[in-house]
Image: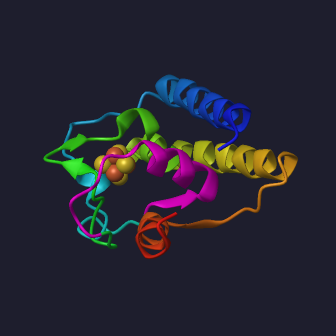
Amino acid sequence: MNPTLEREVRTIYADAERDIAQAGPVCNLSGRCCRFKEYGHTLFISNLEAEILLQNAPPSGRPASEEGCPFQQGKLCTVREHRPLGCRIYFCDPAYQETGQAISEKYIRQLKALAGRYGVPWRYAPLHAFLNHELETGL
Ligand code: SF4
């Protein structure tokens, strides 16, 4: 990925994290945010986030599926510095759901605009779709 584009994506991550810190959702370290199917949610990411994630991720050792994230070990994320926006924004705290949704929409819009400015095609799909594509194509 173009290093300037990557810096801009990471700036968006940092800005989102400031909004999240301000909202102050509660995390009780259940690890449920990364066990998608069990808790009824899907992690959608964009191609910009997928590229940063996959260029920095260790081999997952687990197949990619809708069940859960292959980068989760126990309750820990093995790609924490490089995790996509949805991982940063999602908290299961019931009091935060509406705010989390608004933060998510705000920063996904920014990522999409960034892709447009750099002339990069925009793709938004579940995490496992990107991981499987990488396995199939070696990209
Ligand atoms: S990338 Fe990390 S935070 Fe995101 S779902 Fe996977 S293990 Fe969880």
Residue 75 in percent (x, y) is at 17, 44
Residue 93 makes an appearance in the image: no
Residue 52 inside the magenta-drawn segment: yes
Furthest-front residue in this view: 138
Residue 113 in percent (x, y) is at 80, 48
Does 69 sit left or right of 1 as displayed?
Answer: left
Judge by depth and name the residue closer to the eye, 3 or 102. 3
Residue 48 inside the magenta-drawn segment: yes
Does 36 sit left or right of 85 as displayed?
Answer: left
Residue 82 makes an appearance in the image: yes
Residue at coordinates 64% horizontally, 28% vertically from top-left? 11
Does 106 sit left or right of 92 as displayed?
Answer: right
Relative vertical location of residue 5 with respect to residue 64 in this rendering, above or below: above
Relative vertical location of residue 19 with respect to residue 125 in this rendering, above or below: above
Judge by depth and name the residue closer to the eye, 120 or 92. 120
Quadrant the N terminus occupies: top right
Judge by depth and name the residue closer to the eye, 17 or 130. 130
Residue at coordinates 38% horizontally, 66% vertically from top-left? 41
Relative vertical location of residue 74 with respect to residue 123 in this rendering, above or below: above
Which stretch appears magenta? Answer: 43-63
Residue at coordinates 45% horizontally, 63% vertically from top-left? 127
Does 110 sit left or right of 96 as displayed?
Answer: right
Residue 4 in percent (x, y) is at 72, 31
Residue at coordinates 50% horizontally, 31% vertically from top-left? 20
Relative vertical location of residue 26 with respect to residue 45 in this rendering, above or below: above
Furthest-bottom residue in this view: 136
Residue 125: quadrant of the picture: bottom right
